[in-house]
Amino acid sequence: MRISVRPRPAVGLPGLVGTARVDRRTTALLPRLRPGDVAVVDQVDLDRATAQALVDAGVAAVVNAAPMISGRFPNLGPRVLVDAGITVVDRVGAAGLAAVADGRTVRVHEGTVYAGEDPLARGRAVDAATVESELEEARTGLVTQLETFTYNSAELLRREQDLLLHGLGLPRLRTRIAGRPVVVVVRGHDHERELDLVRPFLSEQQPVLVGVGAGADVLRAAGHRPDVVVLDPLADESEMPSAKVLKAARDVVVRSDRGAGRVTVDQLERLGVRPLAFESTATPEDAALLLADAGDAAVIVGVGMHATLDDFLDRQRAGLASTFLTRLKVGPRLVDATAVPSLYSGRVRPWHLLVVMLAGLVAVAAAIAVTPVGQEWAHQLTAWLTDTLQGLLS
């Protein structure tokens, strides 16, 4: 985890100083952030993926108009920020958000945002103790959230029963998947480390590579060409892969809500890409898993996906039911990338066999050497080597 770069405080004034970057939508703010900036947002229950993106951007502080943890569920974003050493302030309110001008140099100290010595917005300083205390309280309120989740799952299954139960509506890929391993890459928390864990598996098994949104660029940056790219037309610009990656992919699938139109498809066609349409309310990540499962993949390895219960609950509420039902559908095919090193030790190489053969020959020679015949052979071999050596030296 990268620690953010902190600017030096102004002379004589406590706190840290940075340029304020303000936007209610965190996803829209991320592309504008620079190391040392103060990110000013309005997002209730900051999730871990967004928090990690803020850490990766190198922000010095995060000021939130809304509560970092509302208590509805134990979201993991605030913990990521405080663990990275980033100054966190929340609950400055709409007035505080409006008072901080975008691009202005501000100072953050003890829950207050200043312009020089003048206070602009007051909130609450969030530290590790605050995060742990509120996360513990939030866990007690999960019953209500799980009841809502159960209802949403039933509704999604009713709407998507043809897709989830019978595979109807899935596009036909040009990439052959049947019987082959598939690796689905999402740009999520710790995706770089997970991709590094499966590097031997990628080089030796040559799996089908599926990049979800910006996950396609992650694959390309690691030296791999994605075979399939799954896009969401509603995703932020930072989640869209580059045109070069799209053109190199064998299949580009655009997942969209039913009746959403062809805007993204038309844009891709102008780039020379012929995308496949996939209408569904499933998330792009889940759409990629369904495509691999429908193609009869031998195994599906997920990189950057949400694996633990806390990760699962930390997802955006709209995609929670989709993720749950998709994993039920995919079943035993899906393996988390962190488990691959324990399950896959690598392909047997020729030098492995050579070492085993040499070890066997040494064992046989040692067994023969203790017998009378073996001792006689050793005596004859020693005499032959002595005579040969003397002949060469004479």
Image (cartoon, helix red, strand yellow):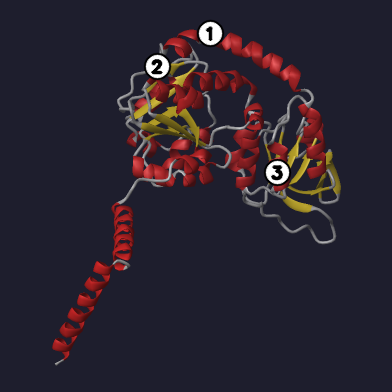
Q: Amino acid at mark 3?
A: Leu
Q: Residue 15, position in %: x, y?
A: 81, 53
Closer to the camera, 94 or 57?
57
The furthest residue to the bottom: 394
The furthest residue to the top: 158
Closer to the camera, 116 or 171?
171
Q: Residue 385, position in %: x, y?
A: 20, 80
Picture quadrant of residue 261: top left
Which residue is at a point 35% across and 40% down the rendered structure image? 205
The residue where tag 3 is placed is 81
Q: CA distance from mark 2 to mark 3?
A: 39 Å
The residue where tag 1 is placed is 159
Q: Amino acid at mark 1?
A: Arg
The residue where tag 2 is placed is 170
Which residue is at a point 31% across and 57% down the rendered structure image? 360
For label 2, the SS is: loop
Q: Residue 382, position in %: x, y?
A: 23, 79
Which residue is at a point 50% across and 27% down the rendered structure image? 285
The furthest residue to the front: 372
Left or right: 243 in relation to 338:
left
Picture quadrant of residue 229: top left
For label 3, the SS is: helix
Which residue is at a point 83% across and 43% down the rendered structure image? 111
